[in-house]
Structure formats: C-alpha cells, structure tokens
Amino acid sequence: MEYPNFRLLNTLIFSMLIMISCESRFSMYAIPNSQDEIALSDAVVVSYIEENLKDHPENLDLAILKIKSLKAEKWPDDSFSFLKKALSKDSLNSSLLELAVDFYLYKGNIDTAFYYSMLAEKYGAHSAKFYRLKSEIYNRKEEYARAIDYINKAILINRSDFESYYTKGEIYLSFGDTTSALKFMKIGLQQYKNNHKILYEVSDIYERTRQYEEAEKLIDEAISFAPNNEMLKIKKAEILIDQNKNEEAKALLNTSFKKDSTHINVGMLLANIHINLLAYDSAILVADRILAFDSLHLDALLLRARTYDQKGYLTSAIKNYEQVLSIDSLHQDALVEWEKVKRKRAYLQKLKEEQEAIPTFDFFIQKKEKI
C-alpha cells in the first residue's frame, strides 16, 4: 500500500520488509531476525517511521514497525503504552500478539506472556521465532517437555536457525542435562561467534563440567572480542585456578587491577589467589586498596581479617572482624570467626602469663670443702 510522502521511507525499509515477509508465509509482519532488528534500531529508519506515524497514526503497518524498533532497543519505558494502543486497534493481529509475547517475556511477566502466546497461536502465529518464544515461556514455567516440543517445532521450520539450537541447549541446561545442553549450544555458537556474552556462558558450562581446556579456549575467544571486559577476565582467572595455574591467574588479574584498582571483583579474586599462594602480605595489600575505594566493603574486610588470623596477627584480625560486625551485626561468618580468634588470643595470652609466672631458680652443686 502506498502513502503520500512515503517514498524515502519505503526505500529505506523495502528490502527489510521483503526479508520479514519471507520469514513466515502466514504474516508479512513476522518478528524479524536479529539482523533486521539492528536495521530497525537505526536512527534514520526510526526517525522516518515516527515522522510518518504523526501523519498516519491509524496505520497498523507503521505501528508494527515502530514496536519492532522498540524491541530492538530492548523495550524502553514508552513501549508498553505504544503496544497497548496498537493492540486496541487490532487485538487479533498475530504479529502484534507475538510482539506482546516478546515484551512481557522480556519484562519477566510469564503469565501475561503465556496469555498472549495462546492468542497469537490461535490467530496464526506459526513462525520459528514464535515457537522459540513459546519454548522459552514453558522453560521458565519449568514445563520442560513442552519447552522441548516447541523448540523442536521451531527447528523443523528453520533448520538453519542456530538460535533455536542454542535455545534448546539452554532448556536442557535448565533441568541439569549439561551433556545435551553443550551438544546443542555448540551448534548454536555458529550464530554467536562474535558474541562474548554467549561465549562466556558456554565457557562457564565447560568449566562446571571440568572441561577446562574447552572452557579456556572459549573464554580466550570472548576476551579477543571484549579485551577490557572485567567479567571475562575473572572467568579466565577462575578457569586457570581450577587447573592450579595460580601464577598465570595472578599475572592476568594483576595487569587489570594495576590499571584500575576500583575493579573490586578483580581485586577480591586476586587477593584470594595471593592467599592460595601463602602470600599473605600481598593479599592484605590488595584488600587495603579495595577498602581505600570502598571502606565499607564487607568481603574485603572479612578477607583482611582472615588473612591477619592466618598470619597470626590476632589483634588485627579481631579489629577487622569487629569492623564487619559494626556494619552487619548479624554477619554469621564474622560472628563465628571473631569468637574463635578471641578464644585463640585469650588462650595464647594465658599461656604467656603462665610462662612468665614460673619462678626461675639457680641450681648449683655445692662444692665440698677440702679437708
């Protein structure tokens, strides 16, 4: 359908609409794949959609494109009101209903997402992406058999959609089948080769199943795409520690912590590595740097208290435990350990006092007088 002043808009989105319409033979407005979503989030495209919506607010085609652009922007605050307004115009439109499913799923409202998914399916939503959404709903409802059924439907519709394989792996992971999870996630990785978050997730599974070489390989790939990401460096250090490569882990984290001592998570892991290596003074130094940035950081205070305890500096340990308890008087670990250190110090003090109280005698053999 042609509208006045739409030529430039149509030029920008014509090819995109062709791709969208090809995704499903049931609806020319099936939810686009990730590449289309990136295009829909383009500022120029969004701007033209909004401008033409002002002139044609009744046009549902434009409304759907606008909602897809909101989805591409991770559903900002104004999404709900716009989606609700569009649904009031056509509550039986399967594409709008699919978008409603996606919105409520993103917001964590599973019951409402399920409600709209039933309507969407009733009124013609049968795309691979829709079935993937359905499988995610059932996965979150812990109805795993239904989740697997729907993701299998998605794969049957589009066997080259690697995202569906990855989703299937996530479902298996939800009920603890890590072997099957890795099998399908590895297939899905073909779609996420450059996605450091996905690489991190799979690396984490390899680590949990003690496949450390694979875990390290994937986390290295992730770091290559996001070299300054603190989360990735921490995961790499954890994998190295799992393999008793404490020195390598220390070198990795040292570089990051020296650049920015406000990286508290990096600092805490680094301090624990120093403790593993019995380098107590270095651990305390790292804890001091963390506390210089955040003087109320409970974990750093607790780590410093424990380190002083291991060094035998009991008074300093007690002082740090008391700092923890001044912030959180019910901190169970601090309470237990504080009492132990106090008893230990009291016992040692008693031994010292007893030792000092033992009288000393000068023993000598009396010489016999010569006759």
Image (spheres, rainbow, N blue to C red):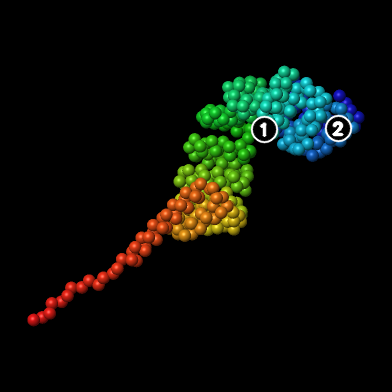
**Which amino acid does the dot numbered 2 rest on?**
Leu
Residue 108: give its label: 1
User: At 67% across and 32% down in the image, what residue appears?
Assistant: 108
The answer to whether mark 1 and mark 2 are in CB contact below 8 A is: no
Give the image quarter of residue 151.
Answer: top right
Pinpoint residue 95: horizontal percent, then vertical percent: 76, 24
User: At 81% across and 23% down in the image, what residue appears?
Assistant: 90
Q: Residue furthest bottom?
A: 371
Q: Quadrant of the C terminus?
A: bottom left
User: At 49% across and 50% down in the image, what residue appears?
Assistant: 335
| Residue 120 versus residue 293 in the image, above or below | above
Q: CA distance from mark 1 to mark 2?
A: 29 Å
Residue 289: give its label: none
Callout 2 crowding tier (Cα within 10 Å): few <14, some 14–19, many ≥20: some
Query: For this rendering, which residue is in front, 370 or 15?
Result: 370
Is residue 250 toward the left or the right of residue 188 in the image?
left
Query: For this rendering, which residue is in front, 75 or 241?
Result: 75
Q: Residue furthest right?
A: 4
Say which residue label 2 marks: 53
Q: Quadrant of the N terminus?
A: top right
User: At 85% across and 27% down in the image, what residue appears?
Assistant: 59
Pinpoint residue 258: horizontal percent, then vertical percent: 58, 56
Query: For this rendering, which residue is in front, 319 or 66?
Result: 319
